[in-house]
Amino acid sequence: MIKESVMSLNVGFIGLGIMGAPMALNLIKAGHQVFLNTRSQINKELLEAGGIACSSPKEVASKADIIITMVPNTKDVELVLFNDNGVASGLSAGKLVIDMSSISPIETKQFAQKIESLGSDYLDAPVSGGEVGAKAGTLSIMVGGKESSFNRAKPLFDVMGKNITLVGHYGAGQTAKVANQIIVALNIEACAEALLFAAKAGADPAKVREALMGGFASSKILEVHAQRMIERTFNPGFRVELHQKDLSIALDTAKQLGLSLPNTSTAQELFNSCSAHGGAGLDHSSMIKALEFMANYEIKA
């Protein structure tokens, strides 16, 4: 169902990949004027729906009052914001930049300070919910920044998500997202181990999953990702290489904080194994393939 907006806003959206394209489309369908830019070709559906193509992030920033970025990693955000034709070069006082990518909390704080120095406001607002949530407009959105900026962006967040939380100041949204990615990775690993164990022990993994869905082991990961493992459908909703990036941020930040994250390290090694065997572009539920490789056994539905 399309969520109707209270009033039309001029919005820029930069980064139109698996997540960004449906998020931008929902904003267009809600009645906002959306200026679009991405490093590849803009999805035809976005243009037909009323999106306006722009040649650069600078052009987007010059035309929009609120500019959203949704790109793969920290370096990409830095380039989109601060390169010669970047967002910063098109900003004027009073605009709002919202980064919805999943990147380093530490560098996020630096980006926010630079944008603030130009007279604009900043929010970090990474999301969880994958492609399914992006299309349905049901993403969880974790936000860091000023409350006034959060309130200004809330009508847009309401179109893209349903669980929207102002976690704290700059970087707090990214910190929450890193925590989310730790939990998701470890849950994927737990489901993979459980299904592999069940199958090798002679039980039907599909029936085991069905039974577990009614108890304390039930989770969104068991519902969605375990089903992908059983059906062997690893087309990406969220790619292994992106989850690797997020866990690298978790482990790097933990090192700076003097923390040990042993199970996060194990999950990262399993993702590394998937990538080493050519699976970097597969869905992160394909982590089970790394365990199957070690066991020399593949689960069968």
Image: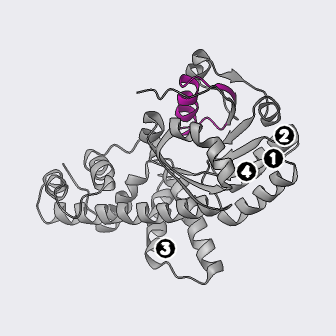
CA distance for labels 4 and 3: 32 Å
CA distance for labels 3 and 1: 38 Å
Can you tell which mark lies on residue 265?
3
Q: Residue at x 47, y 29 (%)?
A: 3
Q: Residue at x 43, y 75 (%)?
A: 263
Comes first in the chain, label 2 or label 3: 2
Q: Name the residue type under label 1.
A: Ser
CA distance for labels 4 and 1: 7 Å
Horizontal relation, residue 160 to residue 229: left or right: right
Outermost residue on the top side: it is 48
Q: Is residue 27 inside the magenta stretch? A: yes
Comes first in the chain, label 2 or label 1: 2
Q: Which residue is mark 2?
A: 91
Tell whether label 1 touches label 3 (CB within 8 Å).
no
Regarding residue 235, the answer to whether it shows in the image is yes
Q: Name the residue type under label 2.
A: Leu
Residue 46, horizontal then vertical, whole percent: 59, 23
Q: Which residue is mark 1?
A: 120
Q: Which residue is mark 4?
A: 122
Q: Name the residue type under label 4.
A: Tyr
Of circles 4 and 3, the one toward us is: 4
Which color mode does the image show? one colour
- Eyeballing the image, is 171 above or below 34? below
CA distance for labels 2 and 1: 7 Å
> Tag 4, which secondary structure?
strand
> Which quadrant would the N terminus be assigned to in this image?
top left
